[in-house]
Amino acid sequence: MGRSKQLGTLLMIGAGIQALFMLVGTMRRSYLAIALPVLAATSAICALAFWVGWTMANTEPELAELEEQESVPVSI
């Protein structure tokens, strides 16, 4: 697993945990006038972070990087 895939996976996990904490915190208090807009904004940011992580985790490496890794140096 490449570095970008690991980073993407960690980003998805972090976004999910943060969204869960925000949801639990919102349910424990009765500040709905403040909490609902903050929850909406935080959810949008978490969704964006999760999407970026998903993209990073599922993107195939570029062909140039693959060719560079597979090439064997030739001595003259």
Image (cartoon, rainbow, N blue to C red):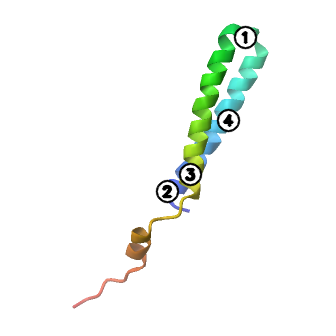
Residue at image mark 1: 32
User: Amino acid under label 4?
Assistant: Ile
Residue at image mark 2: 3
- Mark 4 element type: helix
Query: Badge 2 local density, few (<14 within 10 Å), some, or many (20+)?
Result: few
Query: Badge 1 local density, few (<14 within 10 Å), some, or many (20+)?
Result: few
Closer to the camera: disc 2 or disc 3?
3
Marker disc for residue 17: 4
Q: Which quadrant holds the N terminus?
A: bottom right
Is 59 placed left or right of 26 in the picture?
A: left
Residue 32 placement: quadrant: top right
Residues at marks 1 and 2, CA–CA distance in whole angstroms: 40 Å
Closer to the camera: disc 1 or disc 4?
1
Q: Disc 1 vs disc 4: Cβ atoms closer than 8 Å?
A: no
Residue 20, x across and y down, in percent = 71, 31
User: Amino acid under label 3?
Assistant: Thr
Residue at 62%, 36% in the rendered image:
47
Residues at marks 1 and 4, CA–CA distance in whole angstroms: 21 Å
User: Amino acid under label 1?
Assistant: Leu
Residue at 68%, 24% in the rendered image:
22
- Mark 2 element type: helix
Is 66 placed left or right of 11 in the picture?
A: left
